[in-house]
Image (cartoon, grey):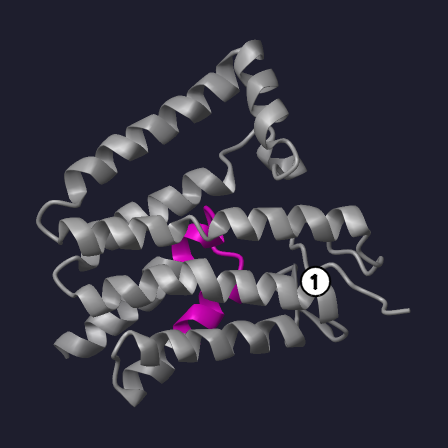
Amino acid sequence: MLKVLTPNPETDSDRPATPEALKKELFRKTFHLCTLLYLGAFLVLGPDRVMAPMLAWMAVVLAFEAVRFHTARGRAWAQRLFGFMIRGKEEAHYTGFFYTSLGALLVFAMFRSHPDVVQASLLYLALGDSASALVGLAWGRHPYWILGRKRTWEGSAAGFAVALAVGLVSGLSPGLTLAGALAFSVADSVPLPPDDNVWIPVLPGAILLGAIQW
């Protein structure tokens, strides 16, 4: 029987992941693919018109979090609808959904004049992060730790491979493709505050933009 180790950075545990944990993470990462909607909005609206609706959407997300934080009814409602995806640490803190939206907003604010960088950055978040987490959770046999955060070599390799593919699909040069994939791997592995859903698109995007302008 396959022994599955959890790469969840909150646990630091070598216990096999339960079927429930696998199902929960799969739901989380499937929901994570909603990041593609942000990319779709950028491609449809264009760099000059995407910021206003994105700021409005961010206000909606903040309102959701405020209701969840400060009202018992809001907490119960959020738990009923999304409890199967909310991690223990997120019950009293911002959710990954908030940080994913914030990451997309920052990508638009910083890189929207370079559509290829925007596309790559959001695909790192939607696809690279999902590949890293799910492969590590299902097949990770060789764990390692960075600053107390547990990852697996299998998950990291999968994320890096997907990040390379993202760079090529986004039309980046081979050098930029490699630089973006390496930056993704750093953001995906090192526990940078406040949340990796912010750094996974922003750090590679900043590296790519800096290299393009250099």
Residue at the far bottom in the pictured view: 174
Residue nearer the viewer, 23 or 132: 23
Residue at the far right in the pictured view: 1
Residue on which disc 1 sits: 137
Element type at marker 1? Answer: helix
In the rendered image of this protein, does residue 115 appear above or below residue 55?
A: below
Residue 21 magenta: no
In the rendered image of this protein, does residue 198 appear above or below residue 145?
A: above
On the image, the x and y values in percent for residue 56 come to: 24, 31
Q: Is residue 107 left or right of residue 145?
A: left
Residue nearer the viewer, 159 or 190: 159
On the image, the x and y values in percent for residue 46 come to: 13, 53
In the rendered image of this protein, does residue 81 appear above or below residue 20?
A: above
On the image, the x and y values in percent for residue 133 come to: 60, 61
* Quarter of the figure with residue 99: top left
Residue in the picture at 82% in, 51% down: 18
Q: Is residue 48 left or right of residue 157?
A: left
Residue at the far front in the pictured view: 44
Give the quadrant of the N terminus: bottom right
Residue 189 magenta: yes
* Quarter of the figure with residue 166: bottom left
Residue in the picture at 74% in, 49% down: 21
Mark 1 residue type: Leu
Residue nearer the viewer, 60 or 30: 30
**Image: magenta residue range:** 182-199
Q: Residues within 10 Å of mark 1 (few under 14, many from 20)?
A: many
